[in-house]
Amino acid sequence: MRILKATALALILAFASFQISEAAPIQLTTDNKWLTWQEEEISIGDFFNVEYQLTGNANVYITDLFVVTDRYEIFLNGNSIGSSIYKPDWSELGGNDPYEHLEFDPEDAFESGKFSKLIFQGKSGDLITVKLTHIPPMWVGGSPFFDSGFAIKAIAQPNGGGEEVPEPATIGLLSAGFAGLFLLRRKK
């Protein structure tokens, strides 16, 4: 009974620590078109989560946008799959002005190498959550920017993403079942 209570408590705490968007997920179509998100008047501790639902099997691309070096953690169906690639803050890239490294075009931001990004594969119906984890400072040693933005797109995988591959545990269970049937038949 203690194990059951401890497991229930752990699940409640895990769910409570992962804030999810209250709105319905944004539909992410596999049409190779960037969708942009910008949130203003945010501060540390007020970081956003944005949720998307994938409409088909696809390769998903996410890039920081506008001022360089915002970073994001990505969740697929509630499980963290990693963070956008670390890039140094604008002050470490050279120059005295964060707007020297400003980009409004998602494709240019993705290809530039200056912006954090992530690529992964998803399946139709997957829920993708983008959680802001870092905002660069407005000036060297200063407060963080008050806004953040990113872009996301999905490109359909050829042939719908290929065939489903069974998990190793499934194969193991099937093999054990067949071995058991073989042994029962052999004893008779």
Image (spheres, rainbow, N blue to C red):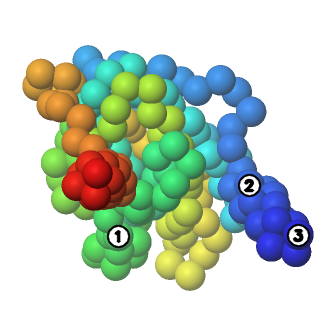
Q: Are marks 2 and 1 in contact (CB under 8 Å)?
A: no
Residue found 11% across the figure and 25% down from its top: 158
**Badge 3: residue crowd in 10 Å (few <14, some 14–19, many ≥20):** few
Is residue 116 among the parts visible in the rendering? no
Which circle, 2 or 1, is nearer the viewer?
A: 2
Residue found 41% across the figure and 58% down from its top: 81
Determine the secondary structure under disc 1: loop
Q: Quadrant of residue 141?
A: bottom right
Q: Which mark is residue 86?
A: 1
Question: Residue flagged by tag 3: what amino acid is it?
Answer: Met
Drawn side of residue 96 relative to residue 18, left or right: left
Q: Quadrant of residue 161?
A: top left
Drawn side of residue 143 relative to residue 104, left or right: right
Q: Which mark is residue 1?
A: 3
Residue found 81% across the figure and 61% down from its top: 8
In whole angstroms, how far apart are the C-alphas of marks 1 and 3?
A: 44 Å
The disc, 2 or 1, on the residue closer to the chain's N-terminal end is 2
Per the image, the residue denoted by label 2 is 15
In whole angstroms, how far apart are the C-alphas of marks 2 and 1?
A: 26 Å
- The image position of residue 165, as x and y in percent, is 22, 42
Q: Are marks 3 and 2 in contact (CB under 8 Å)?
A: no
- The image position of residue 92, as x and y in percent, is 34, 79
